[in-house]
Image: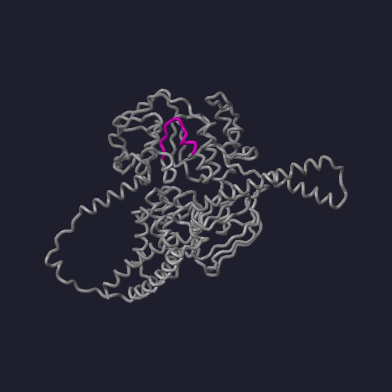
Amino acid sequence: MGVSYLQVENLTKSYGDRMLFDSITFGVEEGDKIGIVAKNGTGKSTLLRILSGAEAPDSGNVVFRNDLRVGFLEQLPQFEPGSTVSEVCLNAIKNNPAHQTEDQWTLSERVNTMLSSMGLHNPDEKVDHLSGGQLKRVALARVLLSDPQLLILDEPTNHLDITTVEWLENFLSRSRMTLLMVTHDRYFLDRVCNKIIEIDMQSIFTYTGNYDYYLKKRQERIEALQGELVKVKNTLRREQEWMSRQPQARAGKARFRINAYYDLKQRASVRYDEKSIDPNDVKSSYIGSKIFEAKNICKRFGDKVILDDFTYTFARYEKVGIIGENGVGKSTFIKMLQGLVAQDSGEWNVGETVRFGYYSQDGLDLPPGKKVIDAITDITEDVVLEDGVRFTPMQFLSRFLFSPADQQKYISTLSGGEMRRLHLAATLITRPNFLILDEPTNDLDIVTLAILEDYLKNFKGCAIIISHDRFFLDSIVDHLFVMEGDGVIKDFPGNYTEYREFIKEQRKAEAAQTKPARPSAAATSKPRKEKMSFKELKEFERLTSEIDELNEEKKRLDDIFASGETIDDVAEMARRYEEIKAELDEKEMRWLELSEKQ
């Protein structure tokens, strides 16, 4: 057993007659990197708010270790109005006793380095003027600079560009911080987490391993549950026959059997059906051979160039992903395509059969006092499919995980994930044949994401997708528009992972071609050796000890792997082995740098 950081005991939370979780118990130990997964509306964010103290449970206890430094990243971070980016971050460091002995210059350098890693290059900018994505990055920088022992993250990758997501993924996978986070980013879960906690059927299920391991074990659990339900229903059928033959029984044995019957009936009512959107049901309208052409499109805002003489002809059934750093104009590009933003010059020629379906970052503008079912009925009262099958709005909404009771909810009461699902339903109910999706994965749970991916793979139309979700892009797109800034758009023929591999190989080739300049006489003379500072000496001693410990741990794992014996937790050991190698590389490099000063 490791050092306990957090213990959650018999935690229960409900809203009215809607139970989120009932008497759940779990612990977080030092070194855990835990991802929490669940369908939208089952209590992921509520659980994190309870842990942060922002919300109270109905019952149960949350106990943190005494004097534990806890950092919490909210989905919608708040800042003191009028503060600058650097002030926000400096205050986070100053509250950490470990940094109180450092001078102002050292603290400022630490802040600027973190902000630069996050793509924030103006530390004196007021937080009041920042976009949602920039605010999220400032909040991340603030919580990381506070150097918590336990870091709790609520959707850390939402509104971040892919470059920042990958930087954060690498930082957290190497960090010794203990993590508890909610995220839908499956690559992120797979590469960072060593434990997955799933909230399902008002209970929790814990899996020791990364996301890929969780998927396999979860499938085994579902199959076992379905097998158990078959047995329960067979037994229930026999008991129903017995009940129908019996008069009202008063004997103790009969009463016991009657009580057992009602218990069986309740157990048999459990449904484990995750299928909500059937791609064979929700089909697109017919799309002709002419889709659209972009001819010499130019767009700028002042000195900022969005498009510079962009020309392209879209083909039928083409699916393209758009990537690029925040602020390069991805959302502006797709708004121009639909005529929502005017270009400065050039023209779009759109085919007559094209019917756009736009899923925007901003979401739907619906009256909060309107019910879910009424919002969809206002769009259409009858959904007619290609084969003549008709859906009512109520039937259509059921495909999007909205039960009859959920459809009667007022829009103002919906969670962020439920709002996104409603937006998705409103987009697809019109049967578009050209989908334009701007960050569709934000706030969607993993189950809904997988179903949406299934739909898009079978979608008989065109799609343009802006997303930072690398797994989503890899699953759907044929090629990428890489927006590099200053109006430059490069067309890459492949998915995101293939693009990243291409960039790595390109950089290796460039580095190999770069030859060092011949050193001058002054440069070849022996430089004066710089001595270690007291702080560096202590760091050198600590690194020596840590490297020895890591090598010992690595040897132990090597011996286990070479033994040929069955290993129960092989996934966790393999993950730890890779983590040790990465830590050794980093620490040995720093050790060598310091050893040069001896």
Q: Height in image: 486 above or below 528?
A: above
Residue 417 lies in the magenta stretch: no
Please name the residue shown 37% across and 57% down the image: 115
Q: Residue furthest left?
A: 521
Please name the residue shown 39% across and 64% down the image: 583
In this rendering, the count of numbered labels is: 0
Magenta stretch? 454-465
| Image quarter hosting the N terminus | bottom right
Which of 111/286 is in front? 286
Q: Height in image: 337 above or below 264?
A: above
In this picture the colour scheme is one colour
In the rendered view, does 570 fall on the left or right side of 126? Answer: right
Residue 457 lies in the magenta stretch: yes
In the rendered view, does 260 fall on the left or right side of 36? Answer: right
Can the viewer see residue 217? yes
Q: Height in image: 554 above or below 391?
A: below
Q: Height in image: 388 above or below 62?
A: above
Which percent across, then down, holds residue 183? 49, 51
Which percent across, then down, holds residue 347? 32, 28
Q: Quadrant of residue 100?
A: bottom left
Can the viewer see residue 151? no
Which percent across, then down, holds residue 545? 39, 74
Which of 492/88 is in front? 492
Which percent across, then down, holds residue 163? 37, 50
Which of 527/380 is in front? 527
| Image quarter hosting the C terminus | bottom left
Which of 300/442 is in front? 442
In the rendered view, does 451 fall on the left or right side of 127? Answer: right
Please name the residue shown 69% across and 43% down the image: 269
